[in-house]
Amino acid sequence: MAEYRINELADISGVSVRNIRVYQDRGLLPPPKIKGRTGWYSSEHLSRLKMISQMLERGYTFATISELLMAARNGLTVEHVLEGEPKRNSRWKNLRRVATITISELRKGLGATDSSIALGQRLGLLVKEGAGYAVTNPEVLAGAEVLVKAGIDLEVLLDRWERVQDDLQDIAASFVSIVTDKYLAEGTTFEMEESEVIRLAELVQTVRPMAHDIVEVAFGKAMDAEISKALDRGAEMMMASDDEKSAAAPDVDTR
C-alpha cells in the first residue's frame, strides 16, 4: 500500500496541507500512522480526501459529511449521495470551501466593515488569499446574509460566534478529559509504547462524534425552548397592542 507524507498527500490530492489538517481536526480524515516522528498517510486517506472534496463541492456541510462517513463505517453506502444535484439555495453555497471572494462582494452582500472582516478572519471564517478571502464555511455566510437583509448587524452575529467559540472550548476540554483523566492523570508515570499512544489518540477521536451528537441534541432542545419563549413574547406584545388600541378607540353608539 502506498504511503505519503502530508506534503506528498497534498500534492497528489490537490488538497492543501492546511485543509488536510482541518479535516483531521473535524474527524473527517483519520489520523496518519506515526512512524518515528513522521505521520504517514495511505491510499485510503487519498480516497477519503477525494470523496470529501466531491461532497464539499456539492454543498454538503462538514457535519453532514461526518454523519455519512460514520454511516459508511456501519455498512451503509455514501457514494450514491453524490448522484444528487448540488444545493443551489444561495450564491454563497455555490462557492467551493476554498473559493476566493473579494472584499467588495463581502461589503455588498453582507455590509461587512473592516472590523467585521478582521473578526471573521480571527474566527477562521475568512482566510486571506491574494486580493480576496477564502471562505471556510459558505453556509454561515448564507445565513448571515439573510440576517443582514433583515436588519441584523453582522458584527452582532460574529460577536455571538466568538463567545460561543470560547464556551465550546470548555465543552470540548470536558469531553476529552473523559479519556485524559483516565490515562494521562497528573502524578502518574507515563510509560506507553508507541502503539499505545496511537491507540490513545484514536480513543480521544472516538469521543468526537459522541460529543457532537450530545451537544447537537442539547443545543436543539435549548433552541426550541428559546424560540418558543420568543414567540410567546411576540404574542403577548401583539395582544397588549390590541388591548391598547381597543382602549383608545372611541365608543360608537350602535343604537
Image (cartoon, rainbow, N blue to C red):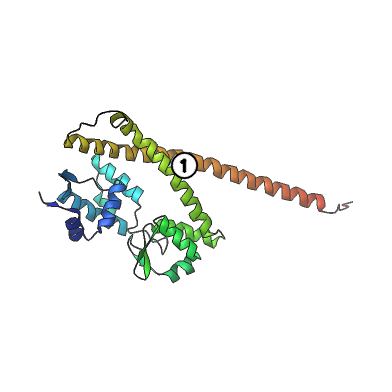
Left or right, residue 43 beside residue 162: left
Q: Secondary structure at mark 1?
A: helix
The x and y percentages for residue 91 are 41, 64
Q: Using the image as rendered, state which of residue 109 and residue 235 is in the foreground.
A: 109
Residue 208 falls in which quadrant of the image?
A: top left
Q: Is residue 121 above or below residue 75?
A: below
Number of residues whose C-alpha sits closer than 10 Å to that of mark 1, classed few (under 14), some (14–19) or many (20 or more)? few
Q: Using the image as rendered, state which of residue 108 and residue 158 is in the foreground.
A: 158
Instruction: Identify the residue under disc 1.
Output: 220
The x and y percentages for residue 81 are 29, 52
Q: Is residue 141 visible?
A: no
Residue 9 falls in which quadrant of the image?
A: bottom left
- Residue displayed at 48% across by 39% down: 221
The x and y percentages for residue 36 are 15, 44
Q: Is residue 150 visible?
A: yes
Q: Residue type at mark 1: give it.
A: Gly
- Residue displayed at 48% across by 61% down: 116
**Residue located farthest toward the left when viewing the structure as drawn:** 1
Q: Is residue 24 above or below residue 106?
A: above
The x and y percentages for residue 140 are 43, 56
Q: Is residue 109 above or below residue 72?
A: below
Left or right, residue 201 beside residue 89: left
Left or right, residue 90 beside residue 156: left
Residue 101 falls in which quadrant of the image?
A: bottom left
